Each structure stands twice: as C-alpha cells, then as structure tokens.
Image (cartoon, helix red, strand yellow):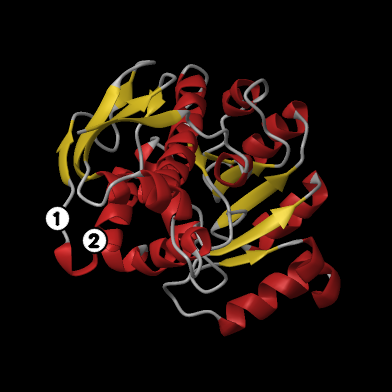
Amino acid sequence: MPHHYAEFVRRELAADLGSAGDITTGATVPVDARGEGQLVARQEGRVCGLEVSLSVFDELCGDARGAVRVEVHAGDGDDVAAGGLIATLEGPARLLLSGERTALNLLGHLSGVATATRDLVRLVSTAGPAAVSCTRKTTPGLRGLEKYAVRVGGGVNHRFGLHDAVLIKDNHRAVAGGVAPAIAAARVALGHLVKLEVEVDTLPQLAEALEIGVDVVLLDNMSVDELSEAVEMARGRAIIEASGGITRETIQAVAATGVDVISVGWITHSAPALDVSLDLTVS
C-alpha cells in the first residue's frame, strides 16, 4: 500500500534529481516527445515490487497522475523467464527517462529478494518441512518492502523490529547473568500476547532454556550434528529455529535435521538484484 513506500520513493527521486532535475533528458529530449517502454527481465526470476516501482512515475507526474499508462504482463509473485515482459509503459518520454533508474533499482532489488527466497524455499522443500525466514538484517529504509518480498518468494517474516517480540541474544544473556536470569526477567515484563525467543549457542544452554520454558529457541551457528541433537531435545517443547551462516549449499542439510524455521539474513540485505531493464522507443 502506498503509505508504506510513498515517502521512500520521494526521497529516492529527490536524491537522483537534486535541485536541477534530469539535465541530460532536459537537454536532449523534446518536451512533447512520447515514449513507449517495455519493462523486461534480463534473467529468470520472481517479480516483486512492481507497484512501488511504477509509483515512481506517478510521483513524477504530480497532479497529472496517470499520465503514464501501464499494462502489466507479470505481477508480483509471477515467475518470468529471461527476456520475459513484465509491463508495458506509455507516456511522456521525459518522465519515463527521469524515473527509469529509481524504478529499476526498486524492482530489481525486491525481485532479487523474492527470487533468492523462492530458491531457498524450493531447496528446503526437498529436505524437510522448515519455513524460510528473513531477519532484522535489512537495508535501511527498506525493511517493510524487503519483508514483503520475502513473503512473495514463499518465505515467512521474523519479527519486524524490537517492538513486536522478545529475542534474548548473547549480549542480553551476558548482561542479565545467564540464560535463566534473562528469561525470568523477560517473563515478568511480558504481556500474554508477546512471544519469547532465546538464542542459544550450546546444548547445555538449550537444556536450561527448555527447563524454564520459552516459546521459541534459536540455535545459533550450530553444526548439523548439534542441530539434530537439539531437535530431539526441543521437539514438542518449543518452536525450533536455526540461524547463522546458512547458504544455498548448506540449507538442505539444516532442513533435514527437522528444525521448524531457518532464518537467513542475506536474503534481504545481500540478495543479488534481478537484472531488469526498460527498453524505450520515442515518438
């Protein structure tokens, strides 16, 4: 929905156009020139972020919103082949050129996140029932959009921020005096609707957390053998999440241990962008 991204789009356009606007287009393209653009995927992938990327042109239109006419051929959640047509745009050539890079940056990045997530979900589905989740390791300013892209890719969202769930990590444990004191303090402060997750690095820490009782255990940087043993300990007592250094090459082995959730930070902050382009003809 626009209120999730409108201000971000305005900031990105302001950064690109500055105080002088698109001086290249202004110098080379007649004011009355019309253009038709084909938004094309240069590689196979999953489309995501089409609405927000197209909103770039509406933002440039100002009071003349709708000056760029759009025909969508592949929307969010659709898989496209290399060379596949995503959308056709028609409108003032200057407007299309000035918004091109901002729109492509958004579409390429969010489609890249969705594609990376989709690929991990497919790998996991061959090895176990685990869900693929993102983390709070997101690009500044893009958290909501990147978490949306993860869902478009078939993944699930971890907490959105520090405000909607408790995750006791290693530094919290250190300051609180250990696993048990940290959990006890959190239980006193929590409302009944707030989930409590604790990160553990060792099997003894896991045993301590399970003895006290938590909603979720996060098994951080454990080996596959440790994960398998941890699953046997925690099954039926808490949701089991694996995290830390998980790659395309290792995720199937992690899923095969029987964990419930596999969280992967790089699918948001470091997923390769999908190569998309706007091929423009001017009349």
Q: Earlier in the sequence, mark 2 or mark 1?
A: 2
Instruction: Residue at 52%, 39% (x, y): give it.
Output: 260
Among the 4 quarters of the image, the one containing residue 47 = top left
Among the 4 quarters of the image, the one containing residue 66 = bottom left
Compared across the picture, whether 98 is left or right of 139 comes to left
Residue 204 % position (x, y): 81, 50
Question: Pointers 2 and 1 in contact (CB under 8 A)?
Answer: yes
Q: Which residue is mark 2?
A: 61
Residue 156 in view of the camera: no
Instruction: Using a 10 Å C-alpha cutoff, classify the residue at mark 1 as few (fewer than 14 neighbours), some (14 to 19) or many (20 or more).
Output: some
Residue 15 in view of the camera: yes
Compared across the picture, whether 74 is left or right of 183 comes to left
Which amino acid type is marked by label 2?
Cys
Instruction: Residue at 85%, 69% (x, y): give it.
Output: 174
Residue 31 % position (x, y): 25, 52
Instruction: Using a 10 Å C-alpha cutoff, classify the residue at mark 2 as few (fewer than 14 neighbours), some (14 to 19) or many (20 or more).
Output: some
Compared across the picture, whether 11 is left or right of 88 comes to right
Instruction: Residue at 70%, 58% (x, y): give it.
Output: 209
Q: Which residue is mark 1?
A: 66
Instruction: Residue at 45%, 22% (x, y): give it.
Output: 122
Residue at far bottom of view: 189
Which amino acid type is marked by label 1?
Gly
Residues under labels 2 and 1: Cα distance?
7 Å
Residue 59 % position (x, y): 29, 62
Above or below residue 123? Residue 149 is below
Q: Which of 94 and 164 lies nearest the eye of the viewer?
A: 94
Q: Which of 239 and 107 lies nearest the eye of the viewer?
A: 107
Residue 264 % position (x, y): 60, 41
